[in-house]
Amino acid sequence: MRPVGSKYLLEEPLGRGATGTVWRARQREAAGAEAAVTGQPGETVAIKVLKEELAQDPDIVMRFLRERSVLLRLTHPNIVRTRDLVVEGDLLALVMDLIDGPDLHRYLRENGPFTPVAASLLTAQIADALAASHADGVVHRDLKPANVLLDERGGQMKPMLTDFGIARLADSPGLTRTHEFVGTPAYVAPESAEGRPQTSAVDIYGAGILLYELLTGRPPFAGGTALEVLHRHLSEDPQRPPTVPEPLWTVIERCLRKEPNERPSAESLARGLRVVASGIGVHSSAEEVEAALGVGALLAPDPSPAPVPETPGAADPTQMLPSTGAQAGAYDPNAMTSVMPPVGAADATSVLSSTAGPGADPTSVMPPVQRPDSPHPWQSQMQAARDRNEQTQIQYLDPNEDPLRRRPQRQAPPPPQHRPQPQQQPPQYRQGPPPPQQQYQQPQQPQYRQPQQPPQQQYAPPPPQHYQPQQHQPQPYQQQPQPQQPQYRQPQQQPPQAPPQRPAPREPREPRRRSANPVRIPGLGCLKGCLVLILVFFVAGWLVWELTPLQEWIGTGKGWWDQVWTWGNDVVDWVGTIGDSAGSSGSGKP
Ligand SMILES: Nc1ncnc2c1ncn2[C@@H]1O[C@H](COP(=O)(O)OP(=O)(O)OP(=O)(O)O)[C@@H](O)[C@H]1O
């Protein structure tokens, strides 16, 4: 067991991330007055020990201390409380409440996607946490399932947002400069990927991605290299999966707007999600369904989004990158990954990262991070970090090589995708249903139209009274017509829009040629053939009737064989007659 300061003892690692390792720890004695929670001896806590290179960066240490008060005062039922910050020698640690439960990333992997109602209520609570932190001027900037812990105490599951401020700490001039981003590619907002100014709207984008992932099991833009993923955030519109109810898709689509000002505030997102959760259940009343349909009107943008403070010196090229043992011109992947861990084969670190490569600042004055002579007890965390997916990355983007600088053209949205205009007017609150409680109760599932599927599809929910892990297995949708329920309309409530632009006059069309068969009747060809056959038989029958002695036979009651026999005899007689006449003429007889 290793002591952290004089107050804590590390017991066992709980998990490792790109910015540090989280340990289960025990309080040795009550913390000092500077801690937010002094705690009692013997109490169990979680301690995130930041990575060595973060702890050795004087800028980060300064920031850590400066942010202390912000991090310590951030309290909310859905935020993991930071109890204390420890700075001791080359060790930087955050002491947090210990959360008994998995993180959402692991939970999703093990249990599959959530039902729409559960996903809505869970994300609503995360939005509550964001609303509180944004009101305090704190932007998370790295919202993702791995940063949401599920507190399982009391038989319920409460999402707890963690890692607040870590992105802020990592966003140090010592680590990130112009053209770099802090975040995880699959969850990075377009403005972060482009290096534009960021606001609290980046967290809303992250919440939209998270909600999408809760519903489908994967984020909308994933796969390929990190650079490709960033590119997709900038250029692609997400597609509505068939299993996502229409009102919920409205929420996701608004959160994932490329333009930050068009995304809803965290507060309105939380409210909207609760209205949706109430209106997409099988037992939802007509009013609740109607309110869910109108959720677009509730998703008001934040009039004054919290800005992400400019990193002092971030754009200053004289700022030194942390030396990772690499010399100018000598690319050392291990040295590089000590700062920027690659995230597996699919990761784009080889494309993105050049901090320690030839582009690294040769005048770096920071102390080298790799010190083989003094192995750190947590050195192995880097290897573990490499094995993980979905990590926060702090990576360098060379502006000359970065295709994201040339902002690609946005792809035209596919026709069935509805893309409502930003809601600029204040939200019009309907007399909606009371928002659900913080616990998951009675998920009620909606009737909603699914894209490219016949209407009247009803989502068959599991029947949990309380939110339970095993109740969030992927659920099939069943078709059960219920005509009394109102159907979701495709278009959302649209705000008044500018008069549409007149389309350019069309090219005159070539006059249509009349088709020989203007009306296509299935089977007509066959019918025609039959009619012709009948006609042929009719004519043939008439000819036989008229030109053959058929009538005579029928009149005399003669059979077919009798007649043939008669014909045969006639022929024989006729041949005999010809033979006789030929013989008499040859002998000269008359
Ligand atoms: N307060 C806590 N209580 C209990 N377990 C925790 C706590 N904080 C983190 N953990 C565990 O530690 C793991 C690693 O946490 P960490 O924040 O380092 O991961 P991460 O978010 O994936 O990393 P990063 O954000 O640096 O990429 C978490 O997935 C979780 O299982």
Image (cartoon, rainbow, N blue to C red):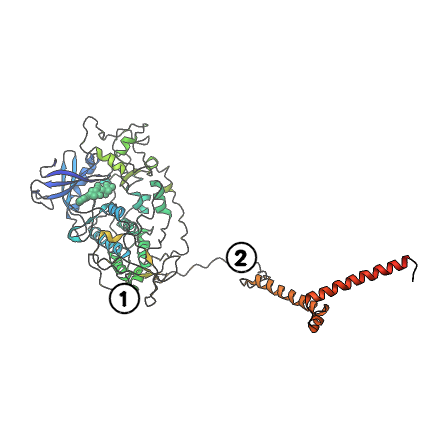
Amino acid type, label 1: Ser
Which residue sits furthest top?
373
Callout 2 secondary element:
loop
Q: Which of 480/188 is in front? A: 480
Give the vertical position of 538 relative to 168 (above or below). Answer: below
Could you tell whether 426 is left or right of 7 in the image?
A: right
Ligand number 1: quarter of image: top left
Residue 582, quarter of picture: bottom right
Which residue sits furthest bottom?
555
Amino acid type, label 2: Glu
Percent of width and height locating residue 430: 26, 65
Give neighbour class at mark 1: few <14, some 14-19, many 20+ (Cα, 10 Å): some
Does any atom of ligand 1 lie closer than 8 Å to the CB of label 2?
no
Reading the image, the residue beneath label 2 is 507
Percent of width and height locating residue 462: 26, 57
Give neighbour class at mark 2: few <14, some 14-19, many 20+ (Cα, 10 Å): few
Give the vertical position of 377 relative to 25 (above or below). Answer: above
The disc label shown at residue 449, or none: none
**Residue drawn at x 37%, y 37% as measured from the top left:** 401
Q: CA distance from mark 1 to mark 2?
A: 50 Å
Q: Quadrant of the N terminus?
A: top left
Of the two numbered discs 1 and 2 on the same chain, state the one appearing first in sequence. 1
Could you tell whether 502 is left or right of 261 in the image?
A: right
Reading the image, the residue beneath label 1 is 285
Residue 87, quarter of picture: top left
